Image: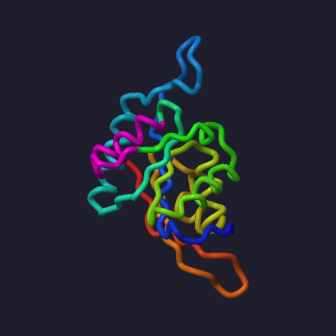
Amino acid sequence: MTTITPPPSRIYLLRHARSGWAEPGQHDFDRTLDNQGFAEAEIVADKAADRNYRPDLVISSTAVRCRQTAEAVRRAVSETIEPVYVDELYNGSLATYLAVLDGQKDSRSVMLVGHNPTMEEVLEALVGADRMVAAIPGGYPPAGLAVLDYRGFTAGSDATWMLTDFLTA
């Protein structure tokens, strides 16, 4: 497991919702959510709002499908949240995602909106492979939202993050 210590003490990991295939000549970066993806983004954002999951900060990849997913969260959770868009999250490595999370010392809770397989790698790095597989045996689904809470240090191991909840559309 990876050591990230608070703040933040709660991390939300949201994989972008389902996107359409790239049109001929269209870059992967510019792919939009398809109709099912728009519905998924709204459903998972509404579920998060219903459970009072309200991040202090939303950080999203600049890819169009992530921006659209982050916008659904903003509408459902709080119109005052202005997502921060980070170019490095598009095609970013595990180390990049973890560095972005670890750098958020002014927020108690942070939501990261990004891509697979990196989102799955972040979850595994923070909670361990066994806990991740138990929660999402089929892999990290589009519009999947992991809620992680910091639980401190345990004897003989790194800082412990616990998977508190996992929402899907």
- The spot of residue 10 in percent (x, y) is 47, 66
The image quadrant that residue 128 belongs to is bottom right
Left of 165 or right of it: where is 137? right
What's the residue at 46%, 69% (across, down)?
A: 164
Prevailing secondary structure class for the magenta stretch in the rendered image: helix
Residue sticking out furthest to the bottom: 155
Left of 1 or right of it: where is 45? left
**Is 71 included in the stretch rendered in magenta?**
yes
Left of 111 or right of it: where is 76? left
What's the residue at 53%, 15% (across, down)?
A: 23
The image quadrant that residue 69 belongs to is top left
| Boundaries of the magenta span | 66-82
Residue sticking out furthest to the top: 25
What's the residue at 48%, 38% (across, down)?
A: 66
Viewer-closest of 164 and 73: 73
**Residue 37, relative to residue 48: is it above or below?**
above
Viewer-closest of 130 and 15: 15
**Is 76 included in the stretch rendered in magenta?**
yes
Residue sticking out furthest to the front: 106
- The spot of residue 18 in percent (x, y) is 46, 36
- The spot of residue 168 in percent (x, y) is 41, 52
Quarter holding the N terminus is: bottom right
What's the residue at 58%, 51% (across, down)?
A: 139
Left of 45 or right of it: where is 97? right
